[in-house]
Image: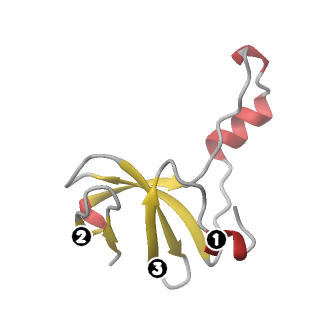
Amino acid sequence: MLLIKCPICDCEGDETDFHYGGEGHIQRPTSSNPDKVGDEAQRDYLYVRKNPRGLHSERWLCERGCGKWFHALRDTATMVISKTYLITDKPPAELKKAGKK
């Protein structure tokens, strides 16, 4: 069972109190003309994910508390969430040190 604490409202609970939203820090393809976004860029944005072993940034929704999205830093091998942080924050140093973004 994952124990998660929302960094916004401090609501704490297991993963059933939250909603998983996939890999964190995914960048939408940018263009002033959406018709110019290529099929490969759109495919990568929608479907391609890293699925690493080790530290991984994920998006979670606080369903029981404030209803806002936040990021969680989870180790996929041990299933331990070591840090939660705001959705607007940059990836933490631990993630960069592990060679991931």
Image: 60 above or below 75 = above
The residue drawn where x is 25% and y is 63% is 10
Numbered-mark total: 3
Q: Earlier in the sequence, mark 1 or mark 3?
A: 3
Question: In the depicted view, which residue is nearer to us: 49 or 60?
Answer: 60
Residue 13's mark? 2
Quadrant of res 85: bottom left
Image: 45 above or below 94 = above
Q: In the image, what residue type sits under mark 1? A: Ala
Assign the C terminus to one quadrant of the image.
bottom right
Q: Earlier in the sequence, mark 3 or mark 2?
A: 2
Question: In the depicted view, which residue is nearer to us: 34 or 8?
Answer: 8
- Reading the image, the residue beneath label 3 is 79
| Label 2: how many Cα within 10 Å (few below 14, some 14–19, many 20+) | some
> Furthest-left residue in view?
64
Q: Earlier in the sequence, mark 2 or mark 1?
A: 2
x, y percentage for residue 29?
70, 33
What coloring was used for the rendering? secondary structure
Image: 48 above or below 16 = above
Q: Is residue 80 left or right of residue 53?
A: left
Q: In the image, what residue type sits under mark 2? A: Gly
Q: Is residue 31 left or right of residue 23?
A: right
Closer to viewer: mark 2 or mark 1:
1
- Reading the image, the residue beneath label 1 is 93
Q: What element does badge 3 sit on?
A: loop
x, y percentage for residue 5?
31, 68
x, y percentage for residue 95?
64, 70
Mark 1 vs mark 3, CA separation in Å: 19 Å
| Label 1: how many Cα within 10 Å (few below 14, some 14–19, many 20+) | few
x, y percentage for residue 78?
50, 85
Closer to viewer: mark 3 or mark 2:
2
The residue drawn where x is 25% and y is 57% is 9
